[in-house]
Image (spheres, helix red, strand yellow):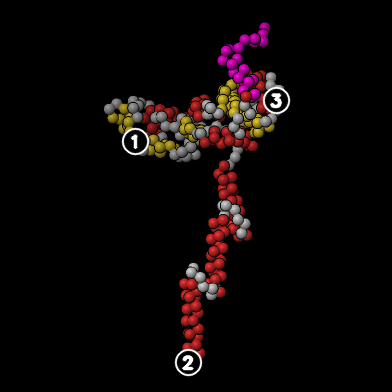
Amino acid sequence: MHQNRTKYPQKKAQMYQQVQELPKKYKVVALVRMEKVRSSQLLPLRKKFKNDVEIISIKDKVAQKALATLKMPAIEKMIDKLVGQCVLMFTNMSPHKLNILLGKNKIMLAARGGDKASIDVIIKAGNTGITPGPILTDFKEAGVATKIDQGTVWITKDSTAAKKGDVISTKLATLLSKLDVKPVEAGIILNAAMEENIVYNQEELLIDVEKYREAFAKAHQEAMSLSIEIGYITKENVSAILARAAQHARSLATESGYLTEETKKQTLQKAHAQATALTGKLKNYTSQ
């Protein structure tokens, strides 16, 4: 007869307690589903964010039960998003900023069959340290030229085993793993996050930083151009406005023949040109 469990492993009990306590300590609870994340990606993140983000890898059922004890209006929406093995992140950082930082902290991973190459997969020439055997067939199928020297397989020249975007077969993935070639770039994206009782889904957390940077740069340039054109002075545009006004003043003085130290050369050159042109016209008139 099935009986409800009353005791749990110490590690699981500690996680349960942490998931109950940490949402009270931090403003943001973020969720990453491990279905597309490898555990090897988490270790560098724990080191990178150890002072700003607490990271817990936990099963969905344990997390659901722990979060269900909290009296937070939006917590039920987070509970619904907990599926399978999950990673919970607790921080006071904006979830959008956290997502951007996670995206920047990508690492290269060994390929699995069916993965797409993130880069051109180059196998460098040199001694592989692998003893000859059936693996020679794998090298041949991958288009990698080899030779046997001193009892090991040598790659005779740099070879491209796959192009960026190519699907890597299971056999090639095994070969690349033996050669310690890591062709898959992997980052982590938040699947959901809760901040101040607002739950954001994955799409709402994605920000195209470059797109916004370009938009702000364009808006800044347009604002500068408009303020200079209408003469609206700010500390950012005052130099440009004064330079433009000085240029207009010099042009007006030259056009009107008003001599100053700055305009006398241009004014005299203009007068000379006009006099020369007038002389030419008079000569033409008298010769007729």
Within 10 Å of the Cα at label 1, are there few (<14), some (14-19), or many (20+) other Cα atoms?
A: some
Q: Which residue lies furthest to the left in this view?
A: 150
Q: Which of 267 and 146 is in front in this view?
A: 267
Q: Residue 72 carries which label?
A: 3
Q: Is 88 in the magenta?
A: no
Q: What residue type is labelled 1?
A: Ala
Q: Which of marks 1 and 3 is nearer the N terminus?
A: 3
Of the image marks 2 and 3, the number of the one nearer the N terminus? 3
Disc ID at residue 287: 2
Is disc 1 placed on a helix, strand or loop? loop
Q: Which residue is drawn at 65% across and 33% down?
A: 201
Q: What element carries label 3?
A: loop
Q: Mark 1 near mark 3, Cβ–Cβ under 8 Å?
A: no
Residue 168 visible at all: no
Relative to 28, say whether 160 is above or below: below
Q: Name the residue under label 1.
A: 125
On the image, the x and y values in percent for residue 29 come to 62, 28
User: Where is residue 13 drawn, in percent x and y?
Assistant: 60, 15
Q: Is residue 250 shown above or below 164?
A: below
- Range of magenta residues: 1-24
Residue 224 vs 54, above or below: the answer is below
Give the residue type at disc 3: Met
What's the amino acid at mark 2?
Answer: Ser
Quick one: label 2, few (<14), some, or many (20+) residues within 10 Å?
few
Verify CB contact (< 8 Å) between mark 1 and mark 2. Answer: no
Secondary structure of the residue carrying tag 2 is loop
Query: CB under 8 Å between callouts 2 and 3?
Result: no
Give me the residue at 38% from left, 26% from top: 134
Measured Cα–Cα span from mark 1 to mark 3: 59 Å
